[in-house]
Image (tube, helix red, strand yellow):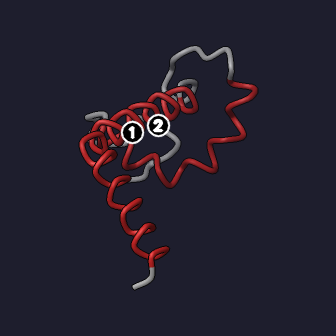
Amino acid sequence: MSLAERWQAFKEGLDEFYHAPYRQTLSRAYRDEQDLFMLLIFAESLGVPNAMTFYTLELQPLLMEEFHDWHKRMGMEHSPMDRFGCC
C-alpha cells in the first residue's frame, strides 16, 4: 500500500468519524424538508389554498410515485385525493 493510498484511507476514516454522529439528524432534516415540499406541491389537491399553484402544478406528475410513501408517513391511511387512488 503506497503512501497516497494510506493518506486517502486516513482521510476517508476522518470523514466517516466526523459525519457518523450527524447522519441520522441530517437524514431526518432532509426528510422533513421533502415532506414540506410535497405538501406545498399537493396543497391545492388537498384543499389548502396555494398561491404557488401555477408554479408547482407541473411538478405533480414527477412526484406522484413518491406520493404514496408521503401520505403514509403523514399518517393518512388512504390517499386524501379523490381523483387519485394510489392505495
Q: Which quadrant does the N terminus fall into? A: bottom left
Question: Relative to the observer, which residue lies in front, 65 or 78?
Answer: 65
Question: Relative to the observer, which residue lies in front, 33 or 71?
Answer: 33
**How packed is label 1: few (under 14 Cα within 10 Å), some, or many (20 or more)?**
few
**Which of the 4 quarters of the picture holds residue 59?**
top right
Q: CA distance from mark 2 to mark 1?
A: 5 Å
- Helix, strand or loop at label 1? It is helix
Placement of 7 over or under 3, stated as above or below: above
Q: Identify the residue at image location x=37%, y=33%.
A: 29
Placement of 7 over or under 71, stated as above or below: below
**Which of the 4 quarters of the picture holds residue 7?**
bottom left
**How packed is label 2: few (under 14 Cα within 10 Å), some, or many (20 or more)?**
few
* Residue indicated by mark 2: 34
CB atoms of marks 2 and 1 within 8 Å = yes
Q: How many marks?
A: 2
- Helix, strand or loop at label 2? It is helix
- What amino acid is labelled 1 in the image? Arg
**For this view, does 57 lie left or right of residue 5?**
right
Residue 31's tag is 1
Q: Identify the residue at image location x=45%, y=82%.
A: 2
Tell which residue pokes out farthest to the right in this image. Answer: 54
Q: Identify the residue at image location x=69%, y=34%.
A: 57
- What amino acid is labelled 2 in the image? Gln
Question: Relative to the observer, which residue lies in front, 37 or 9?
Answer: 9
